Amino acid sequence: MKQTSDYYIKNPLIHKDRRLGKSPSDWVSSFSCEDLKPLIVCRGPIRKEAMDVYEEMGITHYGILLSEKDSIVYPNALAPELRQLTDSRRVHRVPDYTGASKEERVERIHQIISIAKDNGYDSIFAGYGFMAEDDEFVAAIEAAGLKFIGPCSATQAGAGKKDEAKRTALTVNVSVTPGIDNVTARTLLKKHPTREKLLALVKSDGFKCDEQVISNPDISLEDLADHILYASYVKGVDLFSIEELCAQVQAEVADMFRKYPQSRIRLKAIGGGGGKGQRILGASLLPLKKADDKAIAAAAAEAPTLVREILNEVKANGIGDNKNVLIELNIEQTRHNEIQLLGNGDWCIALGGRDCSLQMHEQKLLEVSVTQEGLLAAIERAKAAGNKSEAKALESDLKVLKRMEEESERFGRAVGLDSASTFECIVDRDRHFFMEVNTRIQVEHRVTELCYNLKFTNPKDKNDFFVVESLVEAMALLARHKERLPKPERLVRFNASVEARLNATDDSLSPHAGGMIRYWSKPIDGEIRDDQGISMLNPDTGIFVKYKVAGAYDSNIALLLTKGEDRRDSYERMSEVIRSTTLRGSDLATNLEFHYGLVNWFLGTNVMAKPTTRFVVPYLTLVGTLKEEANKLDPVFAFLQMKKHYAKLLAEQFPDDPKVAKNMSSLLDRKGTLITRPMERLLGDPHLLSGWLSMNTKNFRIDNGKVVWLRNPLGVLNDTYDYLHMSFRPHKPAAEVIWGHDNELLQEALSFSRTLREKLGLQRDEYFQLCELLQKDEPQGGMDAATWEQVRSAHFGYEAGLELLGMLFLVGVNVKFWDLRVEEDLEITIPEYLTDPDLQARMKKVLVPPPATKADEIVSVCGGMYYAQEAPGMPAFVEEGMHFDKGQPLYIIEVMKMFNKVNAPFSGTIDKILIQGGDGTIVQKGQPLFKVTPDEKFVEVDPNEIEREKRTLTTKYLKAVL
């Protein structure tokens, strides 16, 4: 049916009239924000969302800030929001949002404030970018007499910096992750170990310190050192070198390795966020029950390099920058949960949780709502189904959630939270540890919005109230009417929601910049698509406008959200959304298929499962093994061999009637594309195959090496076409759907099968019993002998050839697909072999083969910005004539704001450095970087031999299905 509603422009889930000034209630209308004049200084989906919300609130004078990367540096990356905001007087430009150095950052802050004041704006909204958590930026805004739509500078200083947040948490009895939050103070004490020497620094450098602090003899040396360090930041002075900091971190890491054996350590910048500024070290110690000093020293020796990478990534390597790095125990088997907070400085309310455990490289992928109401309903369902272990596990989650919400509100009140923030924790079964507070709105905030509304009630009249569904709206209300807003009541909107981050990444989830989006199908009913405005059609022609996925930004293209009455419902809707999405372009790679496979993996196992933050990489490795095995099969060859099998079988059964075999051959020819097209699609995309196998887990079993169908393969085939979004739709190109003649044959077969099943009084899942009945010569279901024989013959004809689908099950069996499983207590068992780093690295290359290259060249693994050294002033990784070993760092590629160190795939010698230009040079995927002489000669693989191996394995598979 043709879609009539435009769910992109008018989506009842996210769009509404928010003009409180139109209310007949004097109290409600007094909270109007129509006179607010905000300048939006961020990009990404949140910019477009803020524009929509402000317009719906009746705010007419808002503006946006564009970086030159939006319009000049990257062709076709023009901000799509300009199709909505056509008043050029409200569009302002800066070279970039934050500046590349401390000096540029300060300059940018003043520039933004000048733009705001010169153009009549009274407030600034920074979304969820780095600037949203910059206490200096917020303080400068406040000093200029402007409002900041977000937590105030005092809250930012007390909660936004990860080290200060941990200290605050400890004072209000919030459990924290074990570790060190003041390594910079310890570095300073290493250099100036006494009170006298510290105070001498204050005098010699002329620092402005609090006299009560420095004259207090009871203050600890570490606290005194911290106080002096903060004074040095104000003056823009470094009191130690980065090398001295690195040495101190290395020593502290070694001590933690001794204190916590068989553990890894996480290093985290205090001003990082969104996965940036974090590194983990110590993987080599995990299997060692008692590591010796040599092993510990080797593991800790990674620290200096990682510290430099972290400081580079968060741009904290300038003179006078706060270079503190948190050193924390990495809790291995953990889930990442966060609590949404909202406050006005007096009250603070928790709005449920979000499980963000499904992540990779610290980048969240799938975020799921966790609410008390949703968990209570799930507990009741589990009890009703007799799943005692599941109910107990969910009850534990409910207790943890309640504790986290209580602690988060306590923390929020302690820091005077006066806007939206997120209280982040790691959860280890029935325990949780505070991790950090993000003093900004989160990317995944809509997950919460779909679960709760906020009801603000007149304290003098309980029947006088207004309801807020948007956190962006709530932040604007707080900025305009902070103290007057009464504490709201949270109202359940939907019991469950889920968000999938659509990113520009390849099949191995590595960033893939530079692609061009040329077409994107419209959103469907129940889909929320936050995509920065990419899906806004050309207002003059109504045609999709192509969009360049620029490498200057992070990899996120869009956020896809769905809601449901329970988690399964929300997952099923997400599956439908992804299935219905068509996204086309040139050199375009996204994680859409990954999400489809993952969502359906959970639908086929248990959506209430408890994946840890370590789940995705083993899962991705398993998907890689599916592709490796699928690459060895040839479904067309299998179909031809199956025809020969039937010809031989019928020739033996009907030696005097060759027409029988001939008719069967013609019948199978009619089914050729019906069967092989979906098989080729599944075998060609391991993410799709993963989801398909999970959803079909209960449709087969293996008996003595043979595939036994527990459900009619006709039904499975029909569902497969639906799963692949290939069901018959007359208006779609033939390449995208089942072909007309194939569909007629399939529908005819399904109709026969349905009628026969009903005639014999069987249910859909009683296919095995149906097959047993059809084996009998005696007529069944009240049929006469002639009819029964015709029915048996027709059934044989309709089902013939469908056995080939069983090859897909065998792929799963042979790679031990079902060994990655959800247990009764909802814990996920990850087979040990899937955690092997060597296998993980190999499967990454299987999922995305390296660029084709000559044997004497090393080429760029992806597009991005090339760096020859670890940090400015450091020596280059390689030079001409130098020998390198396998695994040795060769260069760094910055893609989508992530710095990726690329190691040598083999040993050899650098003959010539081919890359022209210095650090920051843009390179393309597959671009030659070095001419090399490998230590070993590469042996080319014979394609004919590969084909022979495929046919041999395919023949082996056929024996198990025919």
Image (cartoon, rainbow, N blue to C red):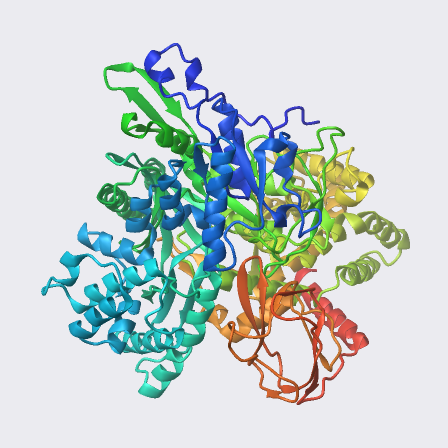
Residue 309: percent from left, percent from top: 47, 68
Who's the residue at 49% across and 30% down the image? 120
951 vs 595, left or right, is: right
How many marks can you see? 0
Q: Nearer the viewer, residue 514 or 207?
A: 207
Q: Residue furthest left?
A: 218
Residue 782: percent from left, percent from top: 65, 33
Q: Nearer the viewer, residue 215 or 940?
A: 215
Who's the residue at 40% across and 47% down the image? 137
813 vs 569, left or right, is: right
Q: Nearer the viewer, residue 28 or 804?
A: 28
Q: State the quadrant of the C terminus.
A: bottom right
Q: Quadrant of residue 857?
A: bottom right
Above or below for 593 versus 764: below
Residue 363: percent from left, percent from top: 48, 56
Could you tell me if residue 16 is visible in this image?
yes
Above or below for 761 versus 73: above
Q: Quadrant of residue 919?
A: bottom right
Q: State the quadrant of the N terminus.
A: top right
Q: Nearer the viewer, residue 85 or 252?
A: 85
Residue 722: percent from left, percent from top: 66, 41
Could you tell me if residue 14 is visible in this image?
no
Who's the residue at 52% across and 33% down the image? 119
Above or below for 517 versus 493: below
Who's the residue at 53% across and 65% down the image? 899
